Image: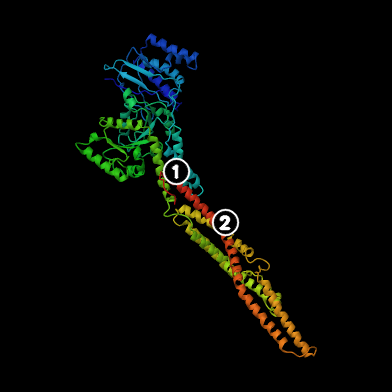
Amino acid sequence: MTAVTAVTDHTDHSDQPGDDEGREGEGREGEGRQERGHARVEDDSVTDRRNAYKNAHKEDPGGEAVRKEKGDSGRVRTETGGGAESGSGSGAGAGPGAGGGSVEAAVGEDEAVGSGMDAVDATDSAGAWDDGLIARRVSVTAEGQTRAVQEIVVDNRSPAVTPLAYDGPLRSRLDALRELVGLSRTRLDNRTLAEAGRVLDEAAARRRLSGQHTVVAIAGATGSGKSQLFNALAGVAISETGVRRPTTAAPIACSWSDGAAGLIDRLGVPGRLRRRPLQSAEAEAQLRGLVLVDLPDHDSAALQHREHVDRMLALVDAVIWVVDPEKYADAVLHERYLRPMAGHAEVTFVVLNQIDRLPGEAADQVLDDLRRLLDDDGIALGEYGEPGATVLALSALTGEGIGELREALGHFVAERGAAARRISADVDAAAVRLWPVYANRRQAGLSEEARDEFADRLADAVGATAAGEAAERAWRRNAGRACGTPWLRLWRWYQDRREPPTGRLSVRPHDEEATARQRVEQAVRTVAERAADGLPSPWAQAVREAAVRGSQGLCEALDELAVRAGAPVGRPPRPGWWPAAVLAQAAMTVLQVVGGLWLAGQVIGFMSPNLGVPVLLMVIGIVGGPGVEWACKLAASGPARRYGLDAERRLREAAAGCGRARVLDPVAAELLRYREVRGQFLRATGVDAPVG
């Protein structure tokens, strides 16, 4: 049997606090071993090779000579020692803890050579592993006497990283969500838009990173066996396990291929907690592109651990939830994580671990009950062909079910679609949160009936009807003056000198002005409520505020319109029959004057007596004058009415125009903005529906 142990070279990563102390400690530990009699035996050829590496590094600081010796093909070099380290130890395996604990290195001559070469490789291959990961394979013979260290030497050129590409529908949804946030910033508070903004930021950040890798987090409660499962998938003890709680204090990342540095940096996993799996080529190929992250306990007593979990869950592409037979129904897990993340079922695995502790058919019964709870949480299990979470039962301790999980993960990673599905689910979740502020109960907008009613209310407030009646009276008065008898015109002239008519409404008294202001305010409130009816609360409030802002100064503007748009200054227009009526009235006056003078001449003896003709002339003039005036009044009723209606129409149009510019247009702008935003909201949800 050959055991495999992971060895992590810290010099490949950025400098970490305490690195120097660690190296000094290793030196002191080596000296202690020599004092205890554990001598290291070096072959002359190995020593010469080590010195050659050191000299080459001194003469060629850039590492060119070393690179030439290594070759450009990334071959694997094997160094064989000539002796074995005596004493007992855990030489078959390595168990670095969560905080980068002790890692057992290879012993013998290879350790001496490796320690000399690492100094060169720290500079030479700093850019080779763009994800900062070092992998070594340690093989132990069946007799446990000889160990061979195979160090993977790769080309200095960093592997090209292919950015993540979203498909057309997802890009369209993200663009719609971005436009939605932009249009809503001045209408909604930042807390309402915070989740949508976070999703956009994370989608943009994820898109710039590798699309050939899938980041999967292993999460679970205390004692569920997360780290055991993590180690089982990696094929080596990477994450520390034990009875101490909590065991995992910080996230540990393990990548199955190069090019995942940006993804792991985004997670905030330090270089000392990054590993590579040590498995066969077939096993590595099955999970190529996987980045596995072991998270702390989500129910840890340490607040920092829970914060790590919450932050990581928002960044990874998929999650493996590990539950155990004792706490699979834990309310914290279901209420805080599974239920809120039901929309992420396509990128969720739920693993029932520790089934080796369940006798007989108990594992199936527990698994069925777990499925029932997941159904209650809203996580579809795919029983009817719909996409949903993958639910498996396994034992990380015995290895039962690990192959099935590995196969499922292999297919999942090979699809290269987890990141896009995760972002799509995030957009869905953000849309669900925004639904109350964009979904309306009925079609929003102002009907023509509501607009006409608003205009009528403003016209009543400005006195359009009274102004039209006043204009009609003014026209009749002018017609009466032009067509009336001279004696009546003289009397009206006398009255006009005392109180000249204007043909318009006089200045309104204070109480009438207050009543008009109340009418205007009531009209504005009514039209605002009708426009906001059915809108979500934030947008209804925005419509009301727009109407109130527009109503400021509206009463004063209407008063000015009443003066300018009332009856025109000067005489009203005269119809075609008006001159004929004036001429007829003049003729009647002439007849009266002629008849009167004739009678006067007869009285004084100037003319011969003849009462019939002058009396007839006077009677015709006296009767004909009022008759002409009466006929003019009848003829003037139509034109006067039209003149009054025209004055009323002008005032109504002026009042409606003022109200439209100050109130209706701002309200319509808010409604248009809402319709645009709602259209973007429907696009973001992926629903093609008419905008209400």
- The answer to whether residue 313 of the structure is visible from this angle is no
* Left or right of 273 on screen, residue 184: right
User: At label 2, which amino acid type do we have?
Assistant: Ala
Q: Nearer the viewer, residue 336 or 547?
A: 547
Question: Tag on residue 196?
Answer: 1
Please tell me whether residue 302 is drawn above or below residue 82 in the rendered image: below
- The answer to whether residue 643 of the structure is visible from this angle is yes
Question: Tag on residue 44?
Answer: none
Number of dots carrying numbers: 2
* Left or right of 285 on screen, residue 361: left
Q: Secondary structure at mark 1?
A: helix
Q: Secondary structure at mark 2?
A: helix
**Quarter in which the N terminus is drawn:** top left
Q: Position of residue 522 (x, y in %)?
A: 52, 63
Query: Residue 200 sits in which quadrant?
Result: top left
Q: To which residue does mark 2 refer?
A: 661
Please tell me whether residue 86 is drawn above or below residue 672 in the rendered image: above
User: In this view, which residue lies farthest toward the top?
Assistant: 44
Query: Residue 323 sits in which quadrant?
Result: top left
Q: Position of residue 75 (x, y in %)?
A: 39, 17
Q: Earlier in the sequence, mark 2 or mark 1?
A: 1
User: At label 1, which amino acid type do we have?
Assistant: Ala
Instruction: Report crowding for label 1: few under 14, some 14 to 19, many 20 or more residues within 10 A (C-alpha).
Output: many
Instruction: Report crowding for label 2: few under 14, some 14 to 19, many 20 or more residues within 10 A (C-alpha).
Output: few
Q: Position of residue 143 (x, y in %)?
A: 26, 16
Q: Nearer the viewer, residue 584 or 424?
A: 584
Q: Nearer the viewer, residue 603 or 403?
A: 603
User: In this view, which residue lies farthest toward the left?
Assistant: 360
* Residue for point 52% across, 55% down: 667
Q: Position of residue 330 (x, y in %)?
A: 30, 43
